Image: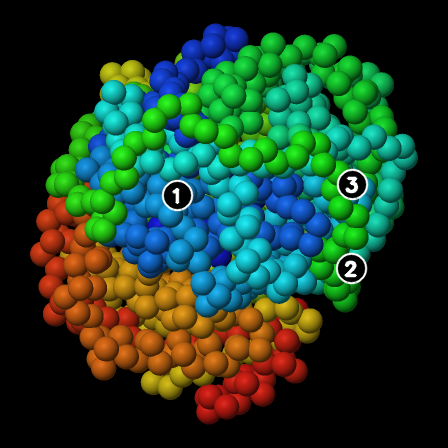
Amino acid sequence: MLREVCRAGFAAMALVLAPVLPVQAAPASAAKTTAAAPQTAFAPAPLSELAASVALKHESFTLPNGLRVVVHTDRKAPVVAVSVWYHIGSKDEPLGKTGFAHLFEHLMYYGSENHDALFFEPLESIGATDANGSTWFDRTNYYETVPTSALDLALFLESDRMGHLLGAVTQAKLDAQRSVVQNEKRQGDNAPYGLSEYAILEGLFPAGHPYRHEAIGSMADLNAASVADVHAWFKANYGPNNAVLVLSGDIDAATAKPLVMKYFGDIPPGPTPARYEAPVPRTTGIKRETMYDAVGNARITRAFAVPGRADAVTPLLDVAATIIAGGSSSRAYNELVRRDQLAVGVSGGVQAYEKVSILEFEIDVKPGADPAKVAARFDAVLNDFLKTGPTADEVQRVATRAVAGTVRSLEAASGQASTLAEGELYTGDPDFYRTELARYANATPEAVAAAARKWLSGGSFELTVLPGKRTDRDLAVDKVAPKLASAAIPAQPPTGALSPPIDRSALPKVGATPALAFPAVERATLSNGIKVTLARRPELPVVKVMLAFDAGISADDRAKPGTQSLMLGLLDEGTTRRTGPAIGEEEERLGANISATAGIDRTRLVLDTLTPNLAASLDLFADIARNPKFDDAELLRVRGQALAGIKAEMTSPQALALRELPPIIYGPDHPYGVPFTGTGTTAGVTAVTRGDLQAFHARWIRPDNAALFVVGDTTLAQIVPLLETAFGDWKLDAAAARGTKSFTSVKAPTAARIVLIDRPGSPQSLILGGKVLGLKGRDDNGTAAFPLVAANDLLGGLSTSRLNLNIREAKGWAYGVQSLASLVQQQLPFLLFAPVQTDRTGDALAAIAADMKAFGTTRPIDAAERDKVVENGVRSLPGEFENAGAVLTSIERNAVFGRPDDYQATLAARYQALTTADLNRAALQLTDGAMVWIVVGDRKLVEPQLAKLKLPVEVRKAP
């Protein structure tokens, strides 16, 4: 499809289109706005009934070689999610081999004996979506969602790396992937608080404990890895008897079994891996450590080791942690953030793993507050909970939120597959998620209190990270070996005859891709003129409602940047009918999520709720959207949170670059020439008054500037009366004129330049390149950019793009390179993002510039690349619109750009009509004009490299 956000884009790049603001509620209306209808008493659906109704019907079977297979049928889209989970993770690594499981995850993507090439190439050619792999303490998994017609090829690839890998693992591949992994590690370490997890795990677990180190491993162990080590690791851990395969989607067991037997059935069983002892450590007192980092505010993390995910107590502890600090309705938020104003945010919850879990609280200290005082106040909140226990309402609210979250996670085939695989791998029961749901639904105050008193009254680890010069550290290299719980068992004979080997000399052919079945669109108009667009998706009892406005960060107050962000941040802090705490509590009772995003052009308020609770959720949604109180005391507090957020952005390389670039490429007076983070400036936020918030809302958040879009389990006949009650009597403020924006044409600079932002001690350099294109997103109803976005896929949008293959795969200088042309309504920004190792900053920038210069000129797009992008675009369509969120975004985009309702159905034909000439013309649009390069890194190490490029360099100091 026309990728309005690159499907594999970095999180920082996604900020350009829709910065998600740190609020729980949607923008509210001005004080003079007519109030919504009086609140009606709505009873939420019974939690036990909701939990019992969640069921993924499946069939399971085991091959003679021990491979466990689970099949779930879901025919809503012609796609199948393929998910392979190996029961091997970082906790299974022996002494001196930290990072091996994750390193091997990378190696298994880089060729097998019968496809000795990057696996992403055939996966992209078949239009695989949600394709990736990951490693954590307990497992390594590979997953992709593919068109049903391409299932054979996906199974061929997964089985080839399971059974036919080692002949393709070479020293050159090991060296290349070691470099990529080390750059991934540097990228994580370079983030604010990026070194904290090393300290937390080492403080929580004793030496020799398998959970004491992160999956990324230590630089020393990664450097020591040899090809012999890698071969031995694979032979010991990746047999079919140590894996689970789940197929979910347009497939059934009768069809799946012969296919799985065909591709996996000839692989002999492997040994049963050795397992290490991983007891839950029990200690007394609080062990404390202090670190320094380049961060905007101090952060206190309190961590407890608790039982693993299969233990019945774990959901109870998660309920307790959420009540204590899990969001804006929690006790710690009400005490530390709202009342005492010592913190700007808190969080709490359980990270559940196989053998142990980690219950963790985080408190972000308000700048200027004493961390020791904050920690003492948190202790008071925690101890009061342990003394008094939770209320029945608190337990019910949190349990409802947990159950609703599980329901939402099961919408896409990929979510279904991972849920079933997780249960089978860790407990031998694919339905274990139902056991967990029942435990949440049946939680009682007494049980939650007893669990908390047992596990939160003992020892814990507390890390305090203070602003300052970073404390240099890496993952500790243990000298204590983990204790063996069970020795490896040699491979046993299969339980039956293995399948005959298949011909693996060529990849299976892919069948015809079915036509996209995009949901039919229905329309209505409320009595006040707000238009309603509905696309039905009845597969799950979930409804999403978007209230969208022509606003966005381009509508922000230029005199006081951050006005809109601050307004959005205040919306869940009180209306004329509800207090801030009451809003959060009601959201939890309903299992609803209300959020706000401000992209460049649009401000969107989104309700995501359960169908049985739709009426009550809409009442809350409308109140938040229409009746804000904008209380002066709350404004003072939330302003402090917003200023702390801006300060935090100044310490993040990605956010800092996204703040600096837009005013340079668009100009400071252009509506797009504002920080793409959407948070405004310190001076602007400081100056905002209550009247400014009311005035902004009256100009922009108003019924004549609004449209409603609905996707989910409802009908037009059901939803329109509910929307009419919620929004139909919303009247204009006659005294406020509708907001307008003024755009001028922007020309790209004729000469490239570099802005170097000095961030001393950075373990990596961040490169963000950008310029303004001549094309406008609204040209030809938003379709003029279609060839341009397809061309960008070849340059930097796909995993196999030219930039990624060169900078990541060939040179190993970065974890990844990404570019995108954002589909905004006015002139498109073209952005390129590359976090690179410090000693290669200049080389990487030169190589990227050379690749861009050759794109469409000395190295034009050829027929093979044209076919690649067309095949990927056409075949990925069924998977692109599998979830309701994608459908919701698409129907809103159709309305904004004036596209027909069947626009998505025309995308396959648009791809197929692309020629190499079309793509090369688009390539020239992307590369014409000079780039502005933002480089965030250590000046003393980077500036000499940049000087060799013979480009003007402006040096700025990181705030």
Spot occupied by residue 777 in the image (x, y as percentages of width and height): 26, 59
Query: For residue 204, which numbered disc appears in the image?
Result: 3
> What is the spatial separation of the Cα atoms under label 1 and label 2, in whole angstroms?
47 Å
Task: Name the spot of residue 619 as percent of width and height, x first.
Answer: 45, 21
Residue under the image location 19 percent in, 37 percent down = 149
Residue 735 visible? no
Element type at mark 3: helix
Under mark 1, the amino acid is Gly
Which color scheme does this rendered protein use?
Answer: rainbow
Q: Earlier in the sequence, mark 3 or mark 1?
A: 1
Please tell me which residue lies in front, 225 or 513: 225
**Residue 79 in the image, given as x and y percentages of width and height:** 26, 34
* Amino acid marked by disc 2: Tyr
Quadrant of res 339: top right
Residue to which mark 2 is pinned:
292
> Are discs 3 and 1 less than 8 Å apart at CB?
no
* Percent of width and height locating residue 861: 20, 70
Say which residue label 1 marks: 163
**Neighbour tally class for label 1: few under 14, some 14-19, many 20 plus, Cα within 10 Å:** many
Sequence-earlier tag: 1 or 2: 1
Label 3 to label 2: alpha-carbon separation:
19 Å
**Is mark 3 in CB contact (under 8 Å) with mark 2?**
no
843 vs 627, nearest the viewer: 843
Other residues around mark 2 within 10 Å, as few (<14) / some (14–19) / many (≥20) = some
Q: What residue do we see at 29% from left, 21% from top? A: 253
Does residue 483 show up? yes
> Which quadrant of the structure image shows residue 511?
top left
In this rendering, the answer to whether 382 lies above or below 914 is: above
Report helix, strand or loop for mark 1. Answer: helix
What's the amino acid at mark 3? Answer: Leu
Camera-side mark, 3 or 1: 1
Q: Nearer the viewer, mark 1 or mark 2?
A: 1
